[in-house]
Amino acid sequence: MWQLLYENLEQTVAVILFGIGFSILLLQRNLIRKIIGLNIMDTAVYLFLASMGYISGKKAPIVVDGVTSAEAYINPIPAGLVLTGIVVSVSFTAIMLALTVRLYRRYHTLDMDEIAMLARGEDG
């Protein structure tokens, strides 16, 4: 069993990171910590995609020395997905941080339970 985990070390680390990020997202009440947990989960997904896209012994898809056979190169789609995901993740993180700043300015706390209680108090 340990041999299998060692052979798939990148995927194992990605699953562990995803679990850490998911538990932070579920168990923490602080909004900043939740955003950090979400970023850890994003990183785990990018690590998993990048590790699945890499094939040992093959080169990046740049034609060099006249080699045009597709079997000589790795698939560039996972790398493109990772780059696109990183851009989306940074944008989403920026929006979430901006909303967190707005919530803090209004309620003077970053605790989700306190914000929910204060928001219910304003409605009634």
Image (tube, rainbow, N blue to C red):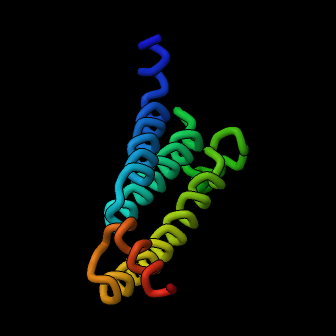
Instruction: Residue at 28%, 76% (x, y): give it.
Output: 109
Instruction: Residue at 39%, 43% (x, y): give it.
Output: 20
The one nearer the camera, 118 or 68, is 118
Is 2 situated left or right of 75 in this image? Answer: left
The one nearer the camera, 44 or 21, is 21
Is 50 situated left or right of 100 in this image? Answer: right
Instruction: Residue at 48%, 27% (x, y): give it.
Output: 8
Q: Is residue 75 above or below residue 3?
A: below
Q: Is residue 55 above or below residue 94?
A: above
Rendered location of residue 111, percent (x, y): 32, 68
Instruction: Residue at 48%, 37% (x, y): give it.
Output: 15
Rendered location of residue 95, percent (x, y): 46, 80
Q: Is residue 79 above or below residue 107?
A: above
Q: Is residue 105 above or below residue 111?
A: below
The one nearer the camera, 73 or 80, is 80
Rendered location of residue 43, percent (x, y): 44, 53
Quadrant position of residue 79:
bottom right
Is 79 situated left or right of 98 in this image? Answer: right
